[in-house]
Image: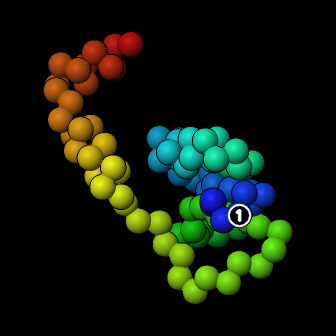
Amino acid sequence: MKENPDAKVLLNGSLDYMMLRPYIKLAEETNHEFSIVQREVGETDIFLVLAAKQEVDIENIQLEKTADDAEQESQADRISLLDKIKNLLK
């Protein structure tokens, strides 16, 4: 995304908002325009597309979890039962 500041982020609308939110946040932080799109026919395992005006020739582009992502997930797993109940009642 840093190498293509004019690119647009397209997100698969079949995903739950909580799964999309980190990518929306990233798009906002990097000032990328983004859209949530729906396929009219069939399903796909593609959930994010970075659409650039110029050709991008990269053979294999995969999103991978970083150490920060793993730490955030670990912290989320440590939420107590009481905190989960409190969140439900909000």
Residue indicated by mark 1? 4
Q: Please identify the quadrant where the N terminus is shown.
A: bottom right
Q: Position of residue 82 (x, y in %)?
A: 18, 19
Determine if residue 24 is in view: no
In the picture, measured across the screen, residue 25 lies left or right of residue 69, that is: right
Q: Position of residue 75 (x, y in %)?
A: 24, 38
* Residue 7 versus residue 44 in the image, above or below: above
Q: Nearer the viewer, residue 62 or 4?
A: 4
* Residue at image point 28% right, 15% down: 86
Q: Nearer the viewer, residue 80 or 68?
A: 68
Density class for disc 1 (Cα within 10 Å; few <14, some 14-19, many ≥20) is: some
In the picture, measured across the screen, residue 68 lies left or right of residue 55, that is: left
* Location of residue 3 by image quarter: bottom right
* Residue at image point 26% right, 46% down: 71
* Location of residue 52 by image quarter: bottom right
Q: Nearer the viewer, residue 39 or 24?
A: 24
Q: Residue furthest front?
A: 3
Determine if residue 8 is in view: yes
* Location of residue 12 by image quarter: bottom right
In the picture, measured across the screen, residue 87 lies left or right of residue 53, that is: left
* Residue at image point 47% right, 66% down: 63
Q: Please identify the quadrant where the C terminus is shown.
A: top left
